C-alpha cells in the first residue's frame, strides 16, 4: 500500500547545502514534524513504536558537526532525525547504505549503532561509495566517531556489491546518483540487486522522493506496488523527502 506523510510547508522547507549544521527552525518544531511522521509509520505497521532517545540523537548530531568534513549535504536536521530514529527504533542487525558520498548520510543511519549516539549494537554497518576519493573521505569521517572501526566504508559499485552479498540486509539506504541520463533512476537497479537478500520486514529508505520524484518514477512505482513491497510511505518532512518501504 502507498501512503504519504506531509508536514505543513515541508515542500518549501529547505537548507543551505554548504552550511548543514545551522539551525533553521526551533528544535521543538523539528521534533514535532518527525514524531508525527513516525506515528504514521507505526500506524502503517512499518515500525513497532515511535520512541527514541532524543538526547542520543543530539549527541550524534554534535559529534558529526564537530568532526566530519562535509563539503555539502542536502540532509536537513529533520531528515537526519528521521533517518537516525528509524534506525534506532528498528535496530537493523545489518544496515547497508549505497552512495554515501562523504559519509554524512551513512552516519545518519549508522550513528544509531556507533559513536556517541549509539543506542544498540549492530552486526554489520556497510557504506558503499563508487568514487574512491569520496570513500576515503567518508572512511576518515566515520573513523573520527567510530575509532574501533565497527562500521565499514567500501569504495565499490553498490550494484555489484549487492549482487554478490550473501546474507540478509535488514535496512537498505539508497542515495546514489548514477551517471548523466540515469541519475536517481539507478535506485531501481539497486533495490532489485538487493531483493534476494531482503527478508520480510526489511526496510528500504530512499532519499529524494520529493525533489527527484520524476527521475525516481520507475523506482517509486515499483516500491508502491504491493506485489513487490508490503508498504511504502512517502515521508515529506522537507523539500527532499524519504520513501520508506517495507518488504
Ligand atoms: C550526490 S551523493 C548523495 C548526497 C546526499 N543526498 C546528501 O545530501 O548528502 C550520491 C553519491 O552516490 C555515489 N554513487 C553513484 N553511483 C554509485 C554506485 N553505483 N555505487 C555506489 N555509489 C554510487 C556518487 O559517487 C555520489 O557520491
Image (spheres, rainbow, N blue to C red):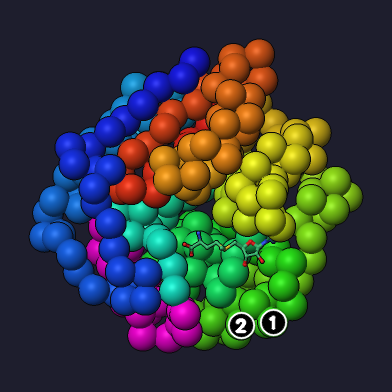
Q: Which mark is residue 133?
A: 1
* Residue 95 counted in the magenta span: no
**Residue at the far front in the pictured view:** 181
In the image: residue 150, left or right of residue 14: right
Q: Which residue is mark 2?
A: 137
Up/down of 167 relative to 147, above or below? above
Query: In this rendering, would 120 be left or right of 221?
Result: left
Q: Is the Cβ of the residue at disc 1 closer than 8 Å to that at disc 2?
A: yes
Q: Is residue 2 above or below residue 119?
A: above
Q: Secondary structure at mark 1?
A: helix
Judging from the image, what secondary structure is the residue with disc 2 in?
A: helix
Looking at the picture, how far across and down is residue 200, in whole percent? 65, 26
Closer-to-camera residue (211/23): 211
Residue 15 falls in image quadrant: bottom left
Is any part of residue 242 visible from this angle? no
Q: Nearer the viewer, mark 1 or mark 2?
A: 1
Answer left or right for 210 relative to 100. Answer: left
> Closer to the camera, 203 or 15?
15
* 84 versus 70 height, above or below: above
Q: Which residues are magenta?
A: 50-71
Residue sitting at x 37%, y 69%? 17
Where ligand 1 lies, by image quadrant?
bottom right
Amino acid at each position: 500500500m502507498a501512503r504519504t506523510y506531509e508536514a505543513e510547508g515541508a515542500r518549501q522547507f529547505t537548507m543551505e547545502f554548504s552550511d548543514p549544521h545551522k539551525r533553521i527552525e526551533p528544535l521543538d518544531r523539528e521534533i514535532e514534524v518527525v514524531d508525527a511522521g513516525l506515528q504514521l509509520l507505526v500506524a502503517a505497521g512499518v515500525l513497532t513504536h515511535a520512541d527514541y532517545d532524543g538526547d542520543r540523537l543530539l549527541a550524534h548530531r554534535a559529534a558529526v558537526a564537530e568532526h566530519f568534513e562535509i563539503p555539502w549535504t542536502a540532509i536537513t536536521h529533520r531528515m537526519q532525525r528521521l533517518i537516525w530514529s528509524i534506525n534506532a527504533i528498528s535496530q537493523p542487525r545489518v544496515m547497508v547504505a549505497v552512495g554515501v558520498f562523504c559519509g554524512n548520510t551513512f552516519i545518519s543511519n549508522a550513528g544509531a549503532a556507533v559513536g556517541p549516539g549509539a543506542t544498540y549494537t549492530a552486526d554489520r554497518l556497510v557504506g558503499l561509495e563508487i568514487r574512491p576519493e569520496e570513500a576515503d573521505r567518508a572512511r576518515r569521517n566515520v573513523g573520527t566517531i567510530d575509532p574501533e572501526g565497527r562500521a565499514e566504508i567500501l569504495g565499490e559499485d553498490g550494484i555489484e556489491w549487492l549482487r554478490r552479498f550473501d546474507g540478509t540486509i535488514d535496512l537498505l539506504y539508497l542515495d546514489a546518483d548514477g551517471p548523466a541520463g540515469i541519475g536517481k533512476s539507478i535506485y531501481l537497479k539497486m533495490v532489485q540487486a538487493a531483493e534476494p537478500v531482503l527478508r520480510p520486514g526489511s526496510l528500504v529508505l530512499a532519499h529524494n522522493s520529493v525533489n527527484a520524484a520524476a527521475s525516481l518514477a520507475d523506482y517509486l512505482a515499483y516500491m508502491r506496488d504491493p506485489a513487490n513491497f508490503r508498504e511504502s510511505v512517502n515521508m515529506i518532512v522537507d523539500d527532499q523527502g524519504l520513501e520508506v518501504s517495507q518488504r
